[in-house]
Structure formats: C-alpha cells, structure tokens
Amino acid sequence: MCGIVGAVTKTPVNQLLYDALLLLQHRGQDAAGIATLRDGSFNMFKGNGLVRDVFRTRNMRNLPGNIGIGQCRYPTAGSSENSEEAQPFYVNAPFGIVLAHNGNLTNWQQLREEMFRIDRRHINTASDSEVLLNVFANELAACASGLSLDEYSIFAAVRALHRRVKGSYAVVATIAGFGLVAFRDPYGIRPLVIGQQDTELGREYMVASESVALEAMGFTVLRDLDPGETATIDLDGNIKFAQCADNAVLMPCIFEYIYFARPDSQMNDISVYRSRLRMGEILAEKVAGQIRVGEIDVVMPIPDSSRPSAMQLAMKLNLPFREGFIKNRYIGRTFIMPGQNIRRKSVRQKLNAIREEFSGKNVLLVDDSIVRGTTSQEIVEMARDSGANKVFFASAAPPVRFPNVYGIDMPTRSELIAATRSEEEVAVAIGADSLIFQDLSALKASLTSLNPKLLEFDASCFDGKYITGDIDAAYLNALEASKEVPRSANVGGGLMRNLGYQRSVQEDNQYD
C-alpha cells in the first residue's frame, strides 16, 4: 500500500507534491520520492524514511518544473536499505518516462521473464513497479508513431498493458515531451482521484490516492478515475479520458474503508468516515445478538481507525463511550516493526491504558480488525492489568483467513490467527471473554448502503476469492514456501510477492 500523487500546474510543482505526500504519509512510511519535468529533462530525488526526513531545502531546489509525480512507499520491515527501491522509477526509452505505482502485480515474475526474453528489456531492481514501468514503456514504443506521441497512442499502450498485467495498480507517470498520465487497474482495486484548481495563471490538475490530498491543497475533486480508465494531461493543461480495459468492473479493496484510508477522504463516492460509522451501527446489531447488552458497562475504541465504529456502536446500544487507551503518536504503526518481541514492546509504548476507566468494569473493546492477534492479545492483557472485570472484543472486520496479494502486507495463512481457528478459539487465543466479528455480508451491505452502485468488492483476505482470477492454491503455497528463500528487497506498489526471488516479508510485519 502506497500513496501516489501527480500534478500539472502553472507554477513550480515541487512544494505541492511534497505537501500532498505529507497528507498521504499514512499510506507509506518506508520511503518517499518526487520527480519533476522541466524543458524535457527529469529531476528526481528519493530516499528511505518519512517524507519530512527524506527531503531537504537543497533537494527541493533541485526539483524544478511545473509537472511531476511523487510517492510514499508502504513500510516493509527488514527490506533492503537501498534507496533505489524507492519510487518513482525512470526509463529513458521511449521518450523518457517516470512512474509511481500503488498496488501489487500478481504476475510480475512472468512479466519480468517476458521483458528479458521477448522485449529485451532489463529490470534493474526487485520491484514489481519497475516491471510495470517497462511493460508500459514497451507498449508505448509499439503504439507510438515514430517520434511523435499523442493521447491516442498512450490510450492504446495502456489498453495493451491491461491485457498483459494482472493484479492491482493505480499509476501516475510523466512522459517527457507530453505530460502526465494516470490510470487504474480494470477492477479499481486501488484508489485514484482527480481534481482541478483554477488560478490566475490558468487551470491546474492533480491526481492522488485519496481526496484529502487534493482538498487540503485547494483542489476541487472532480471524481474517482473509473476502473480501467486512463487520464492524460498534456503540457498545455489539456485533459482527456478514455476507458482502456475490456469488461472493467469496480471492485475496490474493502480494507481501504476498514483501515487504510484517512477518515476525511472520499473513495468511490463514499465517505470513509461515514462508512466506519455505518460499520459500527451494523456491528452493534451482532453484538446485541451475542452478548447481553446489560453486561457491558462501557465501550472503548482501540485508537485510531476504530473510533467512528466504536462511537456509533455505543450510541446504537445506548452504552457509555469512553477513551480507555491513549495513543502515543510518536510511535509508528505496529505492523511495521521487525520481530515479534519488538512488536509486543511497541504496543505498550504506543498505547497506555487509563486505569480508572477499566477498574471493576465489563468493557467492550472495538478494533478495526484482527490479523495476527498479537496486538489484540496485548490490549486485552492491558485491560485486565488495569482492573477490567470482563473484556469483550468486537472487530469491525470479519476474520482474516487468507493472504492479501493486492498490495496490503498481511501475513501468510500460517500466521493469520483466524486462518485455522474458530471465532471461539480466537477469543481464547487473545484472552477475551467473548469475541464478535463483523459478518462479511453485513460489511459489504454497510458500504453499499452509502453507494448503491457499488455492489462488489475485493474482500479476498476474508473470503479467499481473488478477483483477478490468477490466484490459486499453488500460488498461495508458493507464496508461503518463498519464506524459506533469503530476501533481497522490498517492492514497489505494495510488496513483491517474490515466489522465488526473495523471501516473503510477512514474518517480519504485523498488521493489526
């Protein structure tokens, strides 16, 4: 999972891209990069770390131009320290292209081999994003007429790319001599939003992973790019759209709404905040069916993403809502921490219980999801240590039973606490007196109620249905077996599911 942004402006674009990446920092904390274009030449700077730590004044001065792209990369603990794995990526032929990608290619290995054997292109890193860039460049060379390039050649190239590439991908790219290109995979698994701003010098355009990046920078959101759709914005600010995928259908990642996206963002015409309120409202009905509400003294969220759901659940059940845990905002997300012992320690550093809110009470803790169960177990233990009488636990998401292969770094099946356990057994494992999971059908219904046109989702980590049609038992088995192979590096859009080139990053990361 990453944050990407691209813009065509009438004034220097570097500060705009930097500020937008700060707003998308929650989508990637491992590395950041910006590339700009001026007078046909690219200028790029990227490195490992948070956006604020990667860029200095001298770096920003070396990023001139009114068009550019940026990316902040999803954190993968234990990955290569080589900043060359950071994005954007560059290729000099044809025309010169820089590209940033959010997602994960599931057939990257096959494409990598094709690039070498058939297309005679060399892939220099262990990144699926570099593979994607080279596929795009190769198809663009085939579709362009000589040295000239127009939007129709670009649309044809993306159309050919869709036929070759499997997986999830939201992309922004800059092409020397042309302008900005943005496109989304045929299922719209990863988000991409476009907006505009009118200035005294003329109209400006911006594309980003989430609407919050556009709105905070003064842009008006036009709409989400449709699945399979491509947008081009030339150097003069002319914008054109085209549907470039056969049989495109919107099936966005449901975990964006549960956890990853900022609550103040809009995705696919759904307010993320309202979706989380609705999840809590529906979850309340299941809680009432499994626990005698009179037994619950207080409802508490696990900060921060579960707060809207917990608040709405408490209101629906007419129960007191309290903040029982205070979050230290200077500790990173626990799932980026390497090693189980460090993860456990980081939970205690990240959250501290207010003892008075727990003492002698039956508490219902609400979290957005349970993946490994490590954090949940620590939190339940903290509640008991603070004097809780009973600890009930509710998850706004269903049990996570399958790996995610579309860009969210979730553990393999052997590490998913619910993969081989019943809900009752998971409750015992985390130490809760009772555990309630959201039903998948109810979760989908909560989102569809906010946008009736949105009927299908990528919910593969819950139901094992991989919508791209190329994931089977053999693929998942190879994914797990790849953990035995030494790892060399992290990937592009989300993580490289190496299946032979590197060890999986799963054992080092915790999501919940």
Image (cartoon, grey):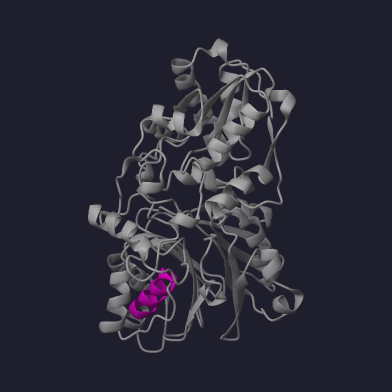
- Above-or-below relation of 321 to 62: above
Q: Give the mark count.
A: 0
Left/right placement of residue 286 relative to residue 319 reads left
* Magenta part of the chain: 127-139
Question: Which of the pair 333/226 is nearer the observer?
Answer: 333
Left/right placement of residue 22 relative to residue 194 reads right
Picture quadrant where residue 115 is located: bottom left
- Above-or-below relation of 267 to 314: below
**Residue at the far top in the pictured view:** 294
x and y percentages locating residue 27 in the rendered image: 56, 55
Q: Residue at x 31, y 70 (%)?
A: 109
Question: Which of the pair 301/281 is nearer the observer?
Answer: 301
x and y percentages locating residue 501 in the rendered image: 36, 71
- Above-or-below relation of 48 to 286: below
Left/right placement of residue 163 relative to residue 448 reads left
x and y percentages locating residue 467 in the rendered image: 30, 50
Question: Which of the pair 336/355 is nearer the observer?
Answer: 355
Q: Is residue 458 visible?
A: no
Picture quadrant where residue 142 is located: bottom left
How would you classify the magenta stretch by its main secondary structure?
helix
Q: Is residue 231 visible?
A: yes
x and y percentages locating residue 360 in the rendered image: 67, 17
Q: Residue at x 42, y 35 (%)?
A: 398
- Above-or-below relation of 239 to 191: below
Q: Residue at x 31, y 44 (%)?
A: 464
Residue 16 magenta-drawn?
no
Residue 137 magenta-drawn?
yes
Picture quadrant where residue 406 is located: bottom left
